């Protein structure tokens, strides 16, 4: 009789355990698998997200299939509204009446079956050089280095109610000085710890290198944690490199890139 009660208690405990685990994990996974979105960055990058996977869309036939869909459109990082996009050699913008709309500046657009959040960063002037000097020193670069790009962005990427500091330093494409080394470094500071996103240090060979910049932050699966797009431009090259980063387990990982 006692053994029977023990078996019943064990069975009930297991059932309760599986119900709780399904509620915590199963429902979450099912919900995540339902998220889908399309991200368009200029004329060089189209990413789709579905079944928790990212895909690069490059074939013309696949791009055509994404035409005449309604997208949330940004121009020069400012929200322009909802428009239809059509792709031929580039993306063209149309209103509800299929009348062409001319938008000046860089195009960013997305469509999603959820409330995808997208935010453009605000660049700030660097006033405290402690972290920059630390990174320069750790990478055997002169503390008196000159820059062609230097700024910071404050953004709470991991939803811990504290904004992290994102820095860009680069001397790529210098016109009025000739450094021995060409460098481009993107890094984040969180609780006085440096986390690198992008680092390229090479011997200077005219206009080599790639100058990075923080393009935008987005929450693609409604988990209140943001991914970010870091883009990188090469000299005299039209198409930029776009990389989507995730900050997880105290490191940055590239989820997808267009190159």
Image (cartoon, rainbow, N blue to C red):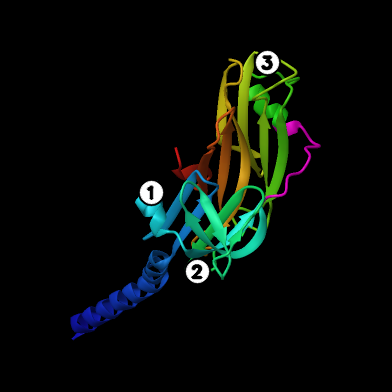
Image-quadrant location for residue 237: top right
Residue 63 coordinates in the image, percent (x, y): 41, 53
Which of marks 2 and 1 precedes in the sequence? Answer: 1
Task: Locate the C terminus by quadrant.
Answer: top left
Task: Locate the N terminus by quadrant.
Answer: bottom left
Q: Is 130 in front, or is 123?
A: 123
> Which residue is at 29% across, 74% downward?
14
Q: CA distance from mark 1 to mark 2?
A: 26 Å
Q: Is residue 128 magenta?
A: yes
Q: Would you name the residue on which mark 1 appears?
A: 60
Q: Would you name the residue on which mark 3 appears?
A: 179
Task: Indicate which label's residue lies in the foreground, 3 or 1.
Answer: 1
Q: Is 163 in front, or is 112?
A: 112
Which of marks 1 and 3 precedes in the sequence? Answer: 1
Task: Indicate which label's residue lies in the foreground, 1 or 2.
Answer: 1
Does residue 75 appear left or right of residue 252 in this picture? right
Q: Which residues are magenta?
A: 120-131
């Amino acid at each position: 009789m006692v053994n029977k009660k023990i078996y019943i208690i064990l069975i009930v405990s297991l059932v309760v355990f599986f119900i709780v685990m399904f509620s915590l994990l199963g429902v979450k996974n099912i919900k995540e698998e339902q998220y889908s979105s399309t991200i368009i960055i200029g004329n060089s990058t189209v990413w789709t997200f579905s079944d928790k996977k990212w895909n690069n869309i490059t074939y013309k036939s696949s791009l055509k299939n994404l035409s005449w869909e309604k997208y949330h459109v940004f121009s020069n990082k400012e929200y322009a509204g909802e428009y239809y996009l059509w792709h031929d050699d580039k993306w063209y913008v149309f209103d509800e009446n299929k009348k062409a709309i001319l938008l000046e500046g860089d195009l960013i657009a997305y469509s999603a079956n959820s409330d995808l959040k997208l935010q453009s960063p605000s660049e700030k002037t660097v006033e405290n050089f402690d972290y920059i000097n630390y990174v320069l020193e750790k990478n055997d670069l002169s503390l008196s280095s000159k820059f062609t790009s230097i700024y910071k962005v404050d953004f709470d990427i991991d939803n811990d109610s504290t904004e992290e500091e994102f820095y860009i330093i680069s001397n790529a494409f210098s016109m009025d000085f000739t450094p021995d080394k060409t460098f481009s470094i993107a890094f984040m500071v969180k609780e006085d710890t440096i986390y690198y996103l992008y680092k390229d240090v090479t011997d200077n060979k005219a206009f080599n290198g790639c100058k990075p910049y923080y393009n935008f932050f987005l929450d693609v699966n409604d988990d209140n944690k943001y991914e970010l797009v870091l883009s990188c431009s090469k000299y005299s090259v039209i198409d930029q490199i776009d990389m989507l980063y995730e900050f997880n387990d105290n490191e940055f990982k590239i989820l997808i890139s267009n190159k």
